[in-house]
Image (spheres, rainbow, N blue to C red):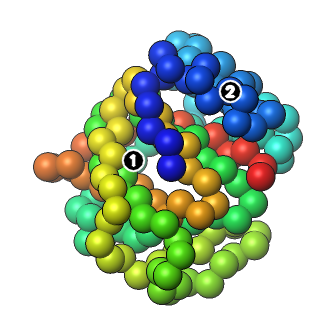
Amino acid sequence: MIVDRIENAHLYASLHKQFQNALAVLADPATARKPDGRHDLDGDDLYFMIQRYVTKPVDQTRFESHKKYIDIQALLAGRELLGYVPTAGLEITVPYDESKDIMFYRAGAMTAQVRLEPGVFCILYPQDAHLPSCQIISPSEVHKIVFKIRV
């Protein structure tokens, strides 16, 4: 997992051929005005989803990971706690669903907690189990962008 501020996004562009494209869209203020849903940039190789939801208590969320895609997650508005732990050694509670590219794990101790707020992004690789949508102190309405980048 990588966590940084958007003004430092250029430091990560060389890590994957699609990162530069995704991070340019993330830095564009017009992106926040896009409607909710999926937006293709390069078909199934690079797309993003705009989401709105209310964060929940940690015990109402679950760790997830993906095999086909790297996530870049950022908030356009609101605040969210995102938990992180390596997938190695985690107990799978919902087996991998290839059609949705997701699997879920039993919640346990987090290796790290990231406070997502506008201006901060995180990059999550397939080996990074993450616990999204968690409230910090109380529920918060969030406006989020999640890039899906084919591994």
Q: Is residue 134 above or below residue 14?
A: below
Residue at x 63%, y 61% (from the top left corner):
126
Residue 45 picture quarter? top right
Q: For mark 1, give the secondary structure.
A: strand
Spatial CA distance of label 1 from label 2 is 29 Å
Instruction: Please identify the residue farthest to the left as the structure is shown.
Output: 137
Residue 68's tag is none
Locate residue 61, reporting x and y percent: 36, 67
Horizontally, is 20 left or right of 140 in the view?
A: right
Q: What residue does disc 1 label?
A: 53
Residue 13's tag is 2
Locate residue 117, reporting x and y percent: 33, 32
Residue at x 44%, y 69% (from the top left corner):
63
Locate residue 36, reporting x and y percent: 57, 37
Horizontally, is 144 left or right of 115 in the view?
A: right
Q: For mark 2, give the secondary structure.
A: helix
Horizontally, is 129 left or right of 120 in the view?
A: right
Locate residue 135, reporting x and y percent: 24, 52
Bin the neighbour count of mark 2 within 10 Å (Cα to Cα): few under 14, some 14-19, many 20 and up.
some
Bin the neighbour count of mark 1 within 10 Å (Cα to Cα): few under 14, some 14-19, many 20 and up.
few
Of label 1 and label 2, which has the lower sequence position?
Answer: 2
Residue at x 43%, y 25% (from the top left corner):
5
Residue 20 picture quarter? top right
Q: Is residue 144 above or below residue 136?
A: above
Choose between 108 and 45: the one closer to the eye.
Answer: 108
Number of labelled discs?
2
Residue 10 picture quarter? top right
Residue at x 56%, y 17% (from the top left corner):
27
Choose between 109 and 117: the one closer to the eye.
Answer: 109
Amino acid marked by disc 1: Tyr
